[in-house]
Amino acid sequence: MLKNILNERKMKKIREQRKKTAKKIAAGTISGIVAGVASGVLLAPKSGKETRSEISEKASEVNSQIKKTAADVKNNIKDKDEKLKSNISEAREKISTYLSERKAKSKEDENCTSCEEVSSEKETKEEISQENNSENN
């Protein structure tokens, strides 16, 4: 049992170290790519004006793509929100209908129970009166 706990802790520590290593590698790779792209653009055999206009165009493209994606995500969220609200209202209606039916049914059951009690009381009174009548005769 103690051996299992120690092994679990050891494995957890190893996983955390692997995660840290993976993050470092990813960060290094991304920074290398960014540095490579920047140096490639800046050291390209184009004039400064061409390079700046190219950077500006790419930035505009990326900006418009981001805006488009954000609009799509916003519309998707609105659609899901509307569906969720619709599902909630449907569920409320179903629950309300179910509860009213149950309430009505329980009232009917109570009424039937009291009807049975009243009829059984009447029968008992009739039996008693018949017994009294037969005793008197």
Image (cartoon, rainbow, N blue to C red):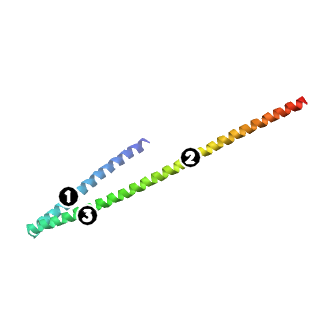
First in sequence, mark 2 or 3: give its number. 3
Do the residues bearing badges 1 and 2 touch, measured as CB atoms within 8 Å?
A: no
Q: Considering only vertical position in the picture, is 136 above or below 69?
A: above
Q: Position of residue 21 (x, y in %)?
A: 27, 53
Q: Residues within 10 Å of mark 3 (few under 14, many from 20)?
A: few
**Quadrant of residue 63 in the image?**
bottom left
Q: Quadrant of the C terminus?
A: top right
Q: Secondary structure at mark 1?
A: helix
Q: Secondary structure at mark 2?
A: helix
Q: Considering only vertical position in the picture, is 87 above or below 54?
A: above
What residue do we see at 21% from left, 65% from top?
A: 61
Q: Which label sits in the foreground, 3 or 1?
A: 3
| Residue type indicated by callout 3 | Gln
Q: Residues within 10 Å of mark 2 (few under 14, many from 20)?
A: few
The Cα–Cα distance between marks 3 and 1, rounded to whole angstroms, is 23 Å
| Residue type indicated by callout 1 | Ser
Q: Quadrant of the N terminus?
A: top left
| Residue type indicated by callout 2 | Ser
Disc number placed over residue 65 in the picture, else none: 3
The Cα–Cα distance between marks 2 and 3, rounded to whole angstroms, is 52 Å
Q: How many marks?
A: 3
What residue do we see at 23% from left, 63% from top?
A: 64
Q: Secondary structure at mark 3?
A: helix
First in sequence, mark 3 or 1: give its number. 1
Q: Position of residue 29 (x, y in %)?
A: 22, 59
Report the side of 136 relative to 73 (left or right): right
Q: Which residue is mark 2?
A: 100
What residue do we see at 9% from left, 67% from top?
A: 49
Q: Position of residue 31 (x, y in %)?
A: 20, 58
Q: Which residue is mark 1?
A: 31
